[in-house]
Amino acid sequence: MTATAPDRHPMSMTVNGNHIDLIVESRRTLADVLREDLGLTGTHLACEHGVCGACTVAVDGAAARACLMLALQADGCSVETVESLCLDGGQLGPLQQAMADSHSFQCAFCAPGFLMTAHCLLAEGRALTREEIREELSGNLCRCTGYQSIV
């Protein structure tokens, strides 16, 4: 694949297990590409400054703010969005179901970011105390809850 203009560049990444080839403008964020080009609207945009965590995705297994990351920085990477947490047939995955069962969210706008941060944290396999979990999730903001049901 070749670039079609000086500010457009070819890239490839694996998104939720699917290999994707794209040509993207150098100024576009990963969040923009995921939402607008790939239709993965589960990645929410709120502050667009990396403060709230609503746009958190996993890039090569690590939690990353998609609103701060240029799409080209994900070239050659594996990206997981909240959509990847669903089971076949669109059923809620275990982490999503646990959050739903505990009524963790009210409006749930922040839920994708919390879910992806928790997903990355669980993938590390570390045993954590409730206080350590709170600390790890502190980069995700929720304006509706007191965080107790999330932890």
Image (cartoon, grey):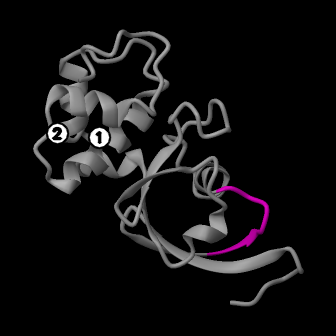
Q: Let me know if residue 24 is in the magenta part.
A: yes
For label 2, the residue is 94
Q: CA–CA distance between discs 2 and 1? A: 12 Å
Is residue 12 shown left or right of residue 88? right
Q: Residue at x 38, y 10 (%)?
A: 145
**Magenta residues?**
22-29
Is residue 121 shown left or right of residue 9? left
Q: How far across and down, in percent of the image, does residue 125 sit?
A: 14, 53
For residue 29, above or below residue 98: below
Q: Residue at x 24, y 32 (%)?
A: 133
Q: Quadrant of residue 11?
A: bottom right
Is residue 93 shown left or right of residue 1? left
* SS label for mark 1: helix
Q: Quadrant of residue 9?
A: bottom right
Q: Let me know if residue 46 is in the magenta part.
A: no
Q: How far across and down, in percent of the image, does residue 40 sit?
A: 52, 49
In what quadrant of the picture does the N terminus appear?
bottom right
For residue 131, above or below residue 18: above
Q: How far across and down, in percent of the image, does residue 34 sit?
A: 58, 54
Q: How far across and down, in percent of the image, does residue 129 sit?
A: 14, 32
For residue 127, above or below residue 114: below
* SS label for mark 2: helix
Is residue 94 shown left or right of residue 109? left
- Which kind of residue does numbered mark 2 sit on? Pro
- Which kind of residue does numbered mark 1 sit on? Ala
Q: Is residue 98 visible?
A: yes
Numbered mark located on residue 62 in the image = none
For label 1, the residue is 118
Q: Residue at x 89, y 80 (%)?
A: 6
In-front residue for pair 119/41: 119
